[in-house]
Image (cartoon, helix red, strand yellow):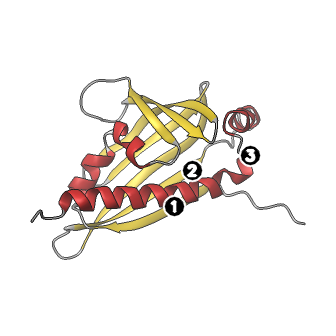
Amino acid sequence: MAAMEREWTVEESVPVAASPDAVYAALSDPRRMREWSPELFAVWVRDRGETAEGTRFVGFNRLRWRIWFTNCEVTAAIPGRAFAFRVTSFGMPVALWGYRIEGIGEDAASTRLAEYWQDLRRDSRTARPVSLLGRVFTGVPAERRAELNRRGMRATLDRIRASLEATAAPRS
């Protein structure tokens, strides 16, 4: 049986019946991600104030019985357009996670929300140790991380959409 080709980047997207500004406002608060992510269960934001490039936070994750944390730094915070952060573990690069936000429709009252993940474990000096640490803490080999993230992204995007559309729905 041939070895599975490793995926280094994954992206999923959904339409959301909310404005790009509303979508960005929700995504740019890292603490809200625990409402939507199937892995992340807590966030500690190190920096006070409005989220901007350079804001740092710690994400606490769980997969079955395994628990681990990652250090994150916001790399893009463009209202109504993009939000992204770099993930490191023990000072080594792990991944880049991000969201692209694009208004759709005539009045841009709806949004195409794309979530993406890029595996940063390619540097020959750090790839092996960070991949080994990832497997020890998460139980997921690096070759299967993209597949797991794709499923997680679909769940996350569906939850974000449901949350924002429930908030945006007119109340009777």
Res. 7 image quadrant: bottom right
Horizontal arrangement in the rendering, residue 128 relative to residue 58 (left or right): right
On the image, numbered disc 2 is attached to which residue? 118
Horizontal arrangement in the rendering, residue 102 relative to residue 129 (left or right): left
Q: Is label 2 in a helix, a strand or a loop?
A: strand
Q: Is label 1 in a helix, a strand or a loop?
A: strand
Tell me the quarter of the image containing the N terminus.
bottom right
Report the mark closest to the observer, 3 or 2: 3
Task: Identify which residue, 71 or 34, lies in the foreground.
Answer: 34
On the image, numbered disc 1 is attached to which residue? 11
Which amino acid type is marked by label 2? Answer: Gln
Tell me, yes or no, whether the two marked residues, 1 and 3, touch with CB atoms within 8 Å: no
Task: Identify which residue, 149 or 72, lies in the foreground.
Answer: 149
On the image, numbered disc 3 is attached to which residue? 141
Name the residue: 28% across, 47% down. 26
- How would you rate the neighbour count of disc 2 (Cα within 10 Å): few for under 14, some for 14-19, many for 20 or more? some
Horizontal arrangement in the rendering, residue 143 relative to residue 72 (left or right): right
Which amino acid type is marked by label 3? Answer: Pro
* Percent x, y of residue 4: 79, 61
* Percent x, y of residue 170: 13, 64
